[in-house]
Image (cartoon, rainbow, N blue to C red):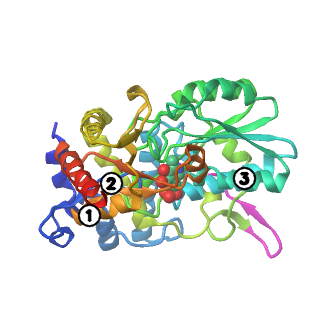
Amino acid sequence: MKDSKALKKDFPIFATKSVKKDGKELIYLDSASTTQKPESVITAITDYYKTSNANIHRGIYTLSEKATIQYEDVRKKTATFINAGTPEEIIFTRNTTEAINLLAYTFGEKHIKQDDEIIVSELEHHSNLVPWQEVVKRKKAKLKVIPIKSDYTPDMDEYHKILSPKTKLVAITSMSNVFGTKTPLKEIIEAAHKKNALVLVDGAQSAAHQKTDVQALNCDFFTMSSHKMLGPTGVGILYGKKELLADLPPFMFGGDMIKSVSQYDSEYADPPVKFEAGTPNIGGIMGFGAALDYINKIGFKTIEENDKKLFEYAVKKLSEIEGINLLIPPADKAGPVISFTLKDIHPHDIAAVLDQDNICIRAGHHCAQPLMEKLGIPATARISFHIYNTPEDIDKTCDSLKKAIKIFE
Ligand SMILES: Cc1ncc(COP(=O)(O)O)c(C=O)c1O
């Protein structure tokens, strides 16, 4: 199997002259935000437009039928990727945010009533918090929050305390985008089901780093974003158990999502088409299919080994820097994400200094403002990696961080 140095060659951006800065190679450590794309993904998108471009589901002609077959093949591939029961359990959206909004709107409308409770955790990205805030406001229901402990993991004792017969839904991340914390999904889901509550897993961060098996997890809904999985932007996934999706009202109305329309009323199609009104991002979905092929080819074993090796190496090297504070969970619960603060240098300044060395890291509140408030800090700097990152990337980042200390001292 190729190592990350060899795999990096699959990603054309790293060999693109214009991304070099003063002769310095691009070091990309912001994969939690969005990943780079391998050549095969870029080719799949251009191939689609060159050889198969037509609208899907409507044409009687060969080109449209070809596009429809390819589009539905990606749905099947996605179902296999997360081990869904059937392809009909896969809904294409624009991103995780839209997938969660779809669920919040439809599930919220149908199933949340006054005084019902929805549980989220303090680890949630705004995308898995704000839509639920809106639902509880609209329905006069309550939002309950699982706090985190000082080791950046969810406080499971508190979870079991706040779970109650009033809980209708638990919406929880599988991996924090701030600390990389992997959450104990099995325990969360089993406990929720005992109280007859459903569980949405926000898989945006974990989907491209660890195998997802929605049937083994027994989660009710699962979301992910293509662009965080080596695929293009503009494609997201909502997985839902068949009988649960069938029970939800549509989210958007218009073309494609209907069975029949008369002047004053309409009958809606079955899932997943019921939730895919209008022309979808067909080209992007072809690219997503190629991204799944690429991940399958490398295999999660290689991805997880590289993540673990780099995490351990980065923790060791970063810890040697004077005045650094790493915000990471215990190693057995850690993903490929490391948030840190460095002396009293603002994370934006750290990112700006690193940018001079052509190193891309994220600095800010990471769409987790309540979490920053709890920590009593405005922001963190964050490195996050994927299969194209190497120990040399970490070495160069540490050198650049030492430079930042000198500049700001
Ligand atoms: C945990 C988590 N959930 C949801 C999202 C939102 O993803 P998207 O911007 O693709 O909708 C992100 C993005 O960073 C995330 O990290």
Q: Are marks 3 and 1 in contact (CB under 8 Å)?
A: no
Residue that label 2 marks: 290
One can see residue 34 in this view: no
Question: Residue 20 location in percent, x, y?
Answer: 17, 68
Mark 2: give few (<14), some (14-19) or many (20+) Cα within 10 Å: many
- Secondary structure of the residue carrying tag 1 is helix
Kind of residue at badge 1: Thr
Give the quarter of the figure containing the C terminus: bottom left
One can see residue 232 in this view: yes
Q: Quadrant of residue 354?
A: bottom left
Question: Residue 341 location in percent, x, y?
Answer: 40, 48
Q: Is residue 156 above or below residue 143?
A: above
- Secondary structure of the residue carrying tag 3 is helix
Residue at 70% of width from left, 51% of height from top? 132
Does residue 287 appear to the left or right of 198 in the view shown? left
Give whichever of 59, 239 is nearer the camera: 239
Residue that label 1 marks: 43
CA gap between label 2 and label 1 equals: 9 Å
Residue at 65% of width from left, 58% of height from top? 274
Residue at 45% of width from left, 41% of height from top? 179
Does residue 47 appear to the left or right of 362 in the view shown? left
Residue that label 3 marks: 133
Mark 3: give few (<14), some (14-19) or many (20+) Cα within 10 Å: some
